[in-house]
Amino acid sequence: MDEALRTVLLLGAEGGSLAILMRPGNPMLFAVQVNDQSLAMIGEGDAVASQSDWVSWEDALARLESYPWRRLYPLTVDSEFAERIMAAVRADARAGSRESLHRWEQLVTDRPAAATDLPSRTSS
């Protein structure tokens, strides 16, 4: 990955991840990156890695909507974009359970401002 790129949002899922990357500039541009290892893990296909074209923030969020991203686990949230991300999480009433929204709020808005890597969470 190019050194100038920043990971704005990294979401973990079993067998893969989704991310929004940011390329600084005027204007800032964003891309959605998908990594899916699930078929390779069960021996039924190849891993999939793709990245969208560079687009506006709004267009990157729109591309993310083709995935159930609010139900995934946020691993990294860039502090500069935390408010925008939480607004997008709250904007969808179908985002999931109250527990899911609470998890997002705890991990994103209740963390120290400088932190971008969120704590690991183990299954109980």
Image (cartoon, rainbow, N blue to C red):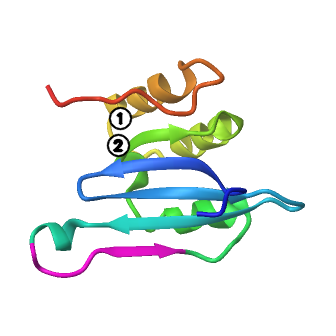
Q: Viewer-proximal residue, 121 or 82?
A: 121
The region drawn magenta spans 43-51
Q: Check whether the beta carbons of the residues at disc 1 and disc 2 lie within 8 A of each other.
A: yes
Left or right of 121? Residue 59 is right
- Please tell me which residue is depicted at 38% across the width and 66% down the height of the picture: 35
Nearer mark to the viewer, of 1 and 2: 1
Q: Locate the C terminus by quadrant.
A: top left
Q: Viewer-proximal residue, 73 or 122?
A: 122
Q: Position of residue 27 (x, y in %)?
A: 86, 62
Q: Amino acid at mark 2?
A: Gly
Q: Quadrant of residue 115?
A: top right
Determine the CA span between mark 1 and mark 2: 6 Å
Q: Residues within 10 Å of mark 1 (few under 14, many from 20)?
A: some
Q: Position of residue 24 (x, y in %)?
A: 79, 56
- Please tell me which residue is depicted at 35% across the width and 43% down the height of the picture: 96
- Please tell me which residue is depicted at 24% across the width and 53% down the height of the picture: 14
Q: Give SS at disc 2.
A: loop
Q: Is residue 78 magenta?
A: no
Q: Residue furthest front?
A: 3
Q: Amino acid at mark 1?
A: Ser
Q: Locate the N terminus by quadrant.
A: bottom right
Q: Residues within 10 Å of mark 2 (few under 14, many from 20)?
A: few
Q: Give SS at disc 1.
A: helix
Q: Write down the residue under mark 2.
A: 96
Q: Viewer-proximal residue, 3 or 103?
A: 3
Q: Write down the residue under mark 1.
A: 100
State how many labels appear: 2
Left or right of 71? Residue 27 is right
- Please tell me which residue is depicted at 50% across the width and 40% down the height of the picture: 76
Q: Position of residue 81 (x, y in %)?
A: 67, 41
Q: Where is 63 relative to 102, above or below?
A: below
Q: Residue furthest bottom?
A: 45
